[in-house]
Amino acid sequence: MGLHVALIGGGMVARVHLDALATHPDVTAISLAELDRAAQEAMARQYPLRRVESDYRRLLEDPTIDVVDICLPHDLHHPVGLAALEAGKHVLSEKPIALTLQEADELIAAAERAGKRYFVALNQRFLPAHAEARRLLHEGAIGRPFMATVTIIGNELERMNQPGHWKGSWERAGGGVLADTGTHAVDLMLWWFGAPDRVTCRWQRTVVEAEDKGDDTTVVVMEYSNGPLVTLAMTYAAADPWSERKRVYGTSGSLHVVSEDAEPLVVFKEGERRVMPVEHDPNWWPYSVKRGVHHFVDCLVHDWEFSVTPQDARETLRVILDAYRAAQGGHDHADWIGSDRRVSDP
Ligand SMILES: NC(=O)c1ccc[n+]([C@@H]2O[C@H](COP(=O)([O-])OP(=O)(O)OC[C@H]3O[C@@H](n4cnc5c(N)ncnc54)[C@H](O)[C@@H]3O)[C@@H](O)[C@H]2O)c1
């Protein structure tokens, strides 16, 4: 089966998607819709594209295109996803699923109506260290987990500090670090531990100066009546290199995932430090994106179930919206949180 894929959006993440698509044997043609001429040219240098357009709707009209891969700012995931499904295309979308739960529900319903496959690329589930950590936790390898701490230390100041740029914008991205890379942290905790009973959050915009932007530094606490006390701490304003650490403490051991390490998964048990064997690439970000994109294509070609469903992506969005809502009492922040448009979500 040879698939023709239309990439929509040709920015930072699209370059990684393009590499993933180009290396899958069942993808035989790739086209691109991108507004920016320089970005079009950069993508065309990376791979011989079948068609390059500025207006994505021209690609949706192309009957040879089977799949649309959405690598756009968050506010465009919903309208472009709907249009692609209505045009009869399968859809792979970058995270988050959408800005609101209503939008997410509309996308899920549109895929069902169209009888098309719809997948949100929550790539961190495709990092083998994360999957193996989940397996170990579920088989009780460290006893009963009572605490988990996740830290995401990143820097997105350049894009966050541009007023009007979608990155970190309340209107276009749904918020700052939590709505963006926080999606991965929340999603992994839901995958490992299930839905929390209670979510609290504190966020600040202390370094980013652009007034239209959301949080640059955020702490979320997820509580379970029957599970660990989970703390997620994240920033987009750090001077040190990007790093992501997940540590889980259990009644008979501890488990650490440090994505940047050559040996990312370590269990501490009975006084020993045990390196757990997992497939890994310290350049873990493109590696996990590629594995996720390949999973999507494999599932299309072989008619397999996706290991991550759109409902999973909706649940992640629900917890993030709950967290922002929970922070409302503690901060005097954007009207966005108080607007009916967002808070009316169930
Ligand atoms: N999974 C991950 O780890 C990960 C990492 C980075 C980004 N992302 C996600 O990928 C998406 C894109 O992020 P990015 O950093 O690549 O953004 P980006 O700004 O670098 O790229 C977006 C591109 O879309 C283009 N664009 C905007 N409107 C368009 C339109 N109507 N038609 C065609 N092109 C249009 C822009 O010109 C830009 O080149 C976001 O959803 C983001 O959250 C995911």
Image (spheres, helix red, strand yellow):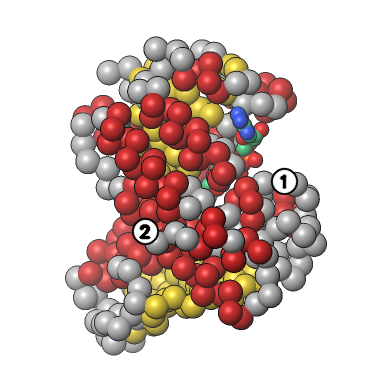
Quadrant in the rendering for residue 223? bottom left
Quick check: 129 left or right of 299?
Answer: right
| Residue at 51%, 51% in the rendered image | 99
Q: Which mark is residue 333?
A: none
Residue labelled with disc 2: 315
**Looking at the picture, which amino acid does disc 1 mark?**
His
Q: Is the C-beta of the residue carrying label 1 under 8 Å from the nearest atom of ligand 1? A: yes
Q: Which mark is residue 165?
A: 1
Q: In which quarter of the image is the N terminus?
A: top left
Residue 193 image position (x, y, % from top left)? 31, 70
Q: In which quarter of the image is the C terminus?
A: bottom left
Query: Residue 332 versus residue 184: which sits nearer the camera?
Result: 332
Image vertical order of residue 14 relative to residue 345, above or below? above
Image vertical order of residue 73 relative to residue 46, above or below? below
Query: Residue 79 versus residue 283: which sits nearer the camera?
Result: 79
Q: Which of marks 1 and 2 is nearer the N terminus?
A: 1
Residue 266 image position (x, y, % from top left)? 38, 70
Quick check: 336 left or right of 164?
Answer: left
